[in-house]
């Protein structure tokens, strides 16, 4: 039989990137190849994000553009997954009737079998909700459900003799129980479920054995991994410690951490586990206590600042990044300026900042005091200008210093390599392609707002190849 080709487009968060990798592995196992372009595909899958209105509209735009391809090739199977699929479900078919599959993230593992048995003249299939767990929770272990039904571990162990990426993502828990007032994720990704420790460890070892030297453990709130509610974050601390012991793993990261669930034992791992990198993403969202309470974040400004102090005490070189929302319903100018103040106090290395966007089902959606679009834009521009200066100053302070860079790609200019420092700074420098996937020692020469320019150090040899 003719081999069939798959084309996946991934929007949204790193968890979607991970899910797309799982889907790709599973499809390859069934004999599918990756298409080089949408035009050469038998199955196009858009893995989508609905975190803000704009993200969701972007997906609809893409789907509408795919109509032309579908007309040219009626056998083409078009599928939508991820959070827009979960949110819109069957309604997507009203806007995009040429779709064949709409599958929410909790049903991802059902796609390969579905696609194999699907022809484009069949009525569209819509699946949402969470797939039933494959194994019932052992009765002796109370706590949140362990999610072992989502993906097939054998996908990672047998079929994929191919090298894994230099840096890989690994989802350790799915869903979210926090219900922040602005956020649609808990409604779309379901309740928190942690994957069994042994399954995560086996997958981590497998990724490293296939060449990944950096792993990022993923979840909407990784700190509540396992039975954190009962054991104060010990399960995550234990998992992180175990993963860090994998031979040949050079760098370990995790994201995202909710500040309300950050135990001292986790703070203490920074600067202690050699592979744990000196960077933490710690979403702040707002600098005003009233807004934080209205957002349902369950920490205040002082608690956030104490956590930052504890982290910097444990690891003085720790780089911090954050997420901030401007224009939450009812946010006054003064409350907005408290967010700006906090950015100046903490001096994050970089931030992701967003205009508040109404999302269906959320508590904030029905709150009074919505802020005008122009005003939200003004606040965002102001805040980003303040942060740009801080980031640039932090970058300039690195000029003349030497940094370890993991080479992960090529820069824009010919002969240029690109990689990240342990504290997640992007560095471009001239060097041989043979350094790909390896650590290089680089001296920083130039600072820009989003990246640094460096020079490969000639005085110190770059670290030896540390792959299997
Ligand atoms: N679980 C993570 C992040 C989830 S989404 C956490 O707890 O922080 C990533 C970021 O998108 C959030 O941190 C928030 O800053 C932003 N975001 C989420 N919902 C939003 C909304 N309705 N409008 C604007 N930004 C939003
Ligand atoms: Fe959304 Fe809050 Fe959950 Fe993060 S912790 S995914 S912001 S509800
Ligand atoms: Fe987007 Fe869903 Fe991730 S809304 S951010 S793809 S969990």
Image: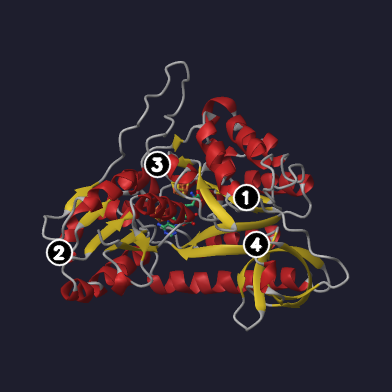
Based on the displayed image, in which of its 4 quarters is residue 166 positioned?
bottom right
Residue lying farthest to the right in this orientation: 459
- Classify mark 4: residues with Cα within 10 Å, few (<14), some (14-19) or many (20+): many
Q: CA distance from mark 2 to mark 4?
A: 44 Å
Q: Which residue is mark 3?
A: 151
Q: Secondary structure at mark 3?
A: loop
* Relative vertical location of residue 393 with respect to residue 190 in this rendering, above or below: below
Q: Which residue is mark 4?
A: 437
Q: Which residue is mark 2?
A: 97
- Classify mark 3: residues with Cα within 10 Å, few (<14), some (14-19) or many (20+): some
Quick one: label 3 or label 2, which is nearer the N terminus?
Answer: 2
Image spot of residue 122 (x, y percent): 11, 56
Q: Nearer the viewer, residue 183 or 221?
A: 221
Q: Secondary structure at mark 1?
A: strand
Q: Is mark 3 within 8 Å of ligand 3?
A: no
Of badges 1 and 3, the one in the foreground is 3
Of badges 1 and 4, the one in the foreground is 4
Q: Secondary structure at mark 2?
A: loop
Q: CA distance from mark 2 to mark 1?
A: 41 Å
Q: CA distance from mark 3 to mark 2?
A: 29 Å
* Relative vertical location of residue 356 with respect to residue 455 in this rendering, above or below: above
């Amino acid at each position: 039989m003719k081999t069939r080709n798959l084309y996946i487009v991934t929007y949204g968060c790193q968890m979607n990137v991970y899910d797309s990798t799982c889907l790709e592995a599973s499809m390859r196992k069934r004999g599918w190849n990756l298409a080089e372009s949408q035009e050469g595909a038998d199955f196009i899958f858009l893995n989508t994000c609905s975190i803000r209105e704009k993200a969701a509209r972007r997906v609809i735009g893409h789907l509408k553009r795919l109509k032309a391809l579908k007309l040219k090739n009626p056998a083409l199977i078009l599928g939508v997954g991820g959070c827009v699929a979960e949110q819109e479900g069957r309604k997507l078919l009203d806007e995009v009737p040429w779709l064949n599959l709409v599958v929410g993230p909790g049903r991802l593992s059902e796609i390969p079998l579905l696609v194999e048995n699907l022809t484009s003249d069949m009525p569209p299939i819509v699946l949402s909700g969470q797939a039933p767990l494959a194994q019932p929770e052992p009765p002796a272990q109370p706590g949140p459900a362990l999610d072992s039904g989502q993906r097939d571990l054998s996908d990672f162990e047998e079929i994929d003799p191919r090298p894994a990426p230099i840096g890989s993502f690994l989802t350790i828990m799915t869903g979210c129980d926090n219900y922040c007032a602005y956020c649609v994720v808990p409604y779309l990704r379901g309740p928190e479920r942690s994957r069994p420790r042994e399954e995560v460890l086996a997958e981590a070892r497998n990724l490293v054995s296939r060449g990944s030297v950096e792993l990022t453990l993923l979840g909407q709130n990784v700190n509540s991994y396992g039975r954190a509610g009962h054991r104060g974050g010990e399960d995550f601390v234990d998992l992180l410690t175990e993963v860090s012991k994998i031979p040949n793993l050079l760098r370990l990261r995790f994201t995202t951490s909710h500040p309300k669930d950050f135990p001292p034992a986790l703070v203490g791992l920074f600067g202690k586990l050699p592979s744990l990198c000196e960077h933490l993403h710690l979403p702040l969202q707002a600098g005003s206590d009233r807004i934080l309470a209205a957002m349902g974040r369950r920490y205040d400004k002082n608690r956030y600042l104490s956590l930052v102090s504890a982290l910097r005490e444990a690891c003085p070189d720790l780089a911090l990044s954050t997420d901030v929302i401007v224009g939450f319903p009812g946010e006054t100018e003064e409350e907005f300026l408290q967010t700006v103040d906090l950015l100046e106090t903490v001096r994050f290395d970089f931030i992701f900042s967003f205009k508040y966007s109404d999302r269906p089902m959320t508590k904030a959606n029905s709150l009074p005091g919505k802020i005008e679009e122009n005003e939200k834009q003004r606040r965002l521009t102001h805040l980003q200008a303040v942060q740009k200066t801080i980031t640039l100053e932090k970058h300039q302070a690195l000029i003349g210093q030497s940094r370890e860079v993991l080479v992960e790609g090529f820069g824009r200019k010919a002969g240029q390599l690109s990689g990240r420092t342990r504290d997640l700074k992007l560095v471009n420098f001239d060097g041989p392609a043979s350094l790909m996937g390896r650590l290089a020692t680089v001296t920083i020469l130039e600072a820009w707002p989003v990246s640094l320019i460096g020079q490969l150090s000639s005085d110190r040899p770059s670290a030896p190849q540390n792959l299997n």
